Amino acid sequence: MPIPDDVKQSIQQGYRDFLGAKGINARYGQRLMIAEIARYLGGITSDDGERTSPASACVVEAGTGTGKTLAYLMSAIPMAKAMDKKLVISTATVALQDQIVQKDLPELREHTNLKFNWTLAKGRGRYLCLSRLEGRLHEEGVQDSDTMPLFLLEGRQDEEPGTREFFEEMLAQYANRKWDGDRDHWPQQIPDDTWRQVTTDHRQCTNRHCSYFDSCAFFEARKGLDEAEVIVANHDLVLADLALGGGAILPRPEEAIFIFDEAHHLPAKALNHFAASVSINGTRNWLKQLAQVIVKMKPYLTPVSTASKTLDRISEASRAYELVLAQVYEEAESNITWTFEDDRQSAQWRFPDGELSERLAELTVEAGAASANLSRHLGVLVDELQKAFDERKDHDIDRQTAESWFPVAGTLHSRAEDQLRLWTAWREVREERRPPPARWAIRQRFDHAEDITFFSSPVLADSLLHSRLWSRAFGVILTSATLTALGSFDRLKSRAGLPASSHFMVVPSAFRYGDMATVEVPPMPALPTEAESFTDALVERLPKLWSDGQAMLVLFTARRQMNAVRDRLAPEWPDVIITQDDMAKGEVLRKHKERVDAGLPSILFGVASFAEGIDLPGKYLQHVVITRLPFSVPDDPIDASLAEWVTARGGNPFMEITVPDASIKLVQAVGRLLRTESDKGRVTILDRRIVTRRYGSLLLDALPPFRRLVSN
């Protein structure tokens, strides 16, 4: 629809009001972004709320200093309301999610004429399950009870002192409404192992049939979701909802406009969501647990009931599945070439072109059939237990038994379905003109056991995102500081399968890069390809770089080298070097800032996760050192499979995949330096390949236009 005059006026007046209230000037790039998003949304045509124009996305690369969050909120909120669509804002990190919910949205509503409400959407696993909590407390009090079997699948563990008291405190705080059941709102961090015992998922949850439904933390939060005009989520939750068909947790894609901030993460996260794996011996051990559950459940069911007969079928299917898995393990152990290197306890094998051996392919078909049979019978058991919740009908299973065993059956069924996904993926026939799926296996050695795990993953997320998101969503906006690679959107188009009608824009930066920072490439006696010599060179060069006392971030591509350099320098520089593994991320940054505030030198050592997503403005970071160019690890099976496909088509995988990927990572890394328009500093690249190799000029030219100081 064309942008209505009143909506256009609302956006313009809201922007003026916000700038005036905050006492800041309009930014050219921000204004361009506001206009582009409004123009894109205004170009979507619809009939009775259904999109009639071709699928498309609005892709905006906007660097640090643009103010992109304000830009997309200012334009998209009025447009979404005018179109009667929900606005779903998705981020890749919790930090940005919190910033939007706690700062950006409240400020926008306070300082403008825009009227809207919002909520934060989280998955079921972020909320307390009262049924699980009650069961956990019951287990604590009655150690041998079989009447509350919710934790049969967790395994008994020796609890830390005070665990029972902790769960009792959790219940009391929730009952007194001092806590809303959100894991992230508990005053202390709850360990994963503890939290898993008191939360649930869609397979275990009985929804409206649960005795605690009226006081359920998750469904209480869902009420706000139904009423909200703006919903803040994360990429994982959006993808999980899409995998369930869309509309299970979030609005249906057809009824929503999506904004993906930090959108460069979206293709990789999509691959993670649609990958599959099966641990062979781990699954065989799980089948033994399943047998124990059947024995314990049997007395609670009437012998002639469908549920009881189904347990017998599950038992038979389980034994058949175990027999096939034993053959699969023997075949993989004997006929795959395993290479254990450097005293490592694991070895990896990737199947070239995704092709399995003839015998392994036969066993995959058998395992898939056995897995499907087991999954089907477990599904019947879940359905039978669920029928018992319908009080309008008589049933062979009483409600108490159903409430106790439904979560167990749901968990079993969910795991069986996950396994079936792997066997199905391993049996899929390769599509023409599409890269084959990556298929690989990892063999691990433990103290008293071994295991082999099979994996499968698509190598591109294009078709997945197209079928589940682009083709269905009313509108989609993608934004990030790093969406282009080597000055082009081609990489993103290929990886994400963006629709042909999409809009693309690179917003000019507000930073005067040439005045604010330099990029320096000093002489180095060795290249990163000369591992030991290069480590020696780093040990010699780094102290010279931090001799000026400026706060510094040194980025490595491997922990092994980071720790080796730290170990050799730490004796001479005690307390000065802090690695990202020394403590939790927040504590590392806090300690770094404390030293800088005290006028003391502070050097951060980090790897990939510190090359993105840390914000150290001004004096807290004045020098970023790149030790080596961030090329992908050559043994990554997904990247290797994609490279294999590109080669088979006559392409050059290094120039088409590796260099563009490295370019994005390098831009992200140097982006840690300048966070505000008043920042100054320098970037030093110690990998001379950026000036000695043919591809080096491409990487250098893709960086912001810093003043260059390159030594011959």
Image: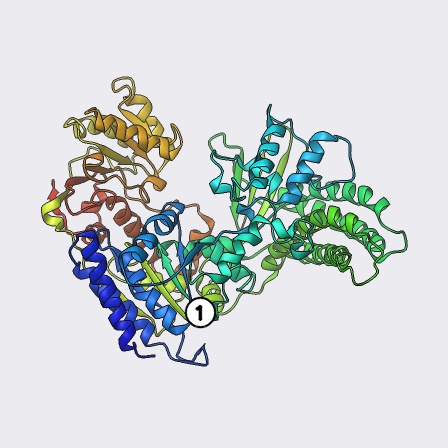
Residue at image point 66% right, 50% down: 204
Q: Foreground residue, 283 or 426?
A: 283
Please name the residue that numbered disc 1 is placed on: 473
Hey, which residue is sitting farthest bottom in the picture? 47
Above-or-below relation of 323 to 108: above
| Color style of the picture | rainbow
Above-or-below relation of 269 to 164: below
User: Is residue 436 visible to us here?
Assistant: no
Hey, which residue is sitting farthest top in the picture? 571
Q: Residue 559 lies in what quarter of the image?
A: top left
Residue at image point 27% right, 27% down: 594
Left or right of 233, for residue 481: left
Label 1 amino acid? Ala
Q: Position of residue 659 (x, y in %)?
A: 30, 53
Hey, which residue is sitting farthest left in the picture? 515
Residue at image point 66% right, 38% down: 154
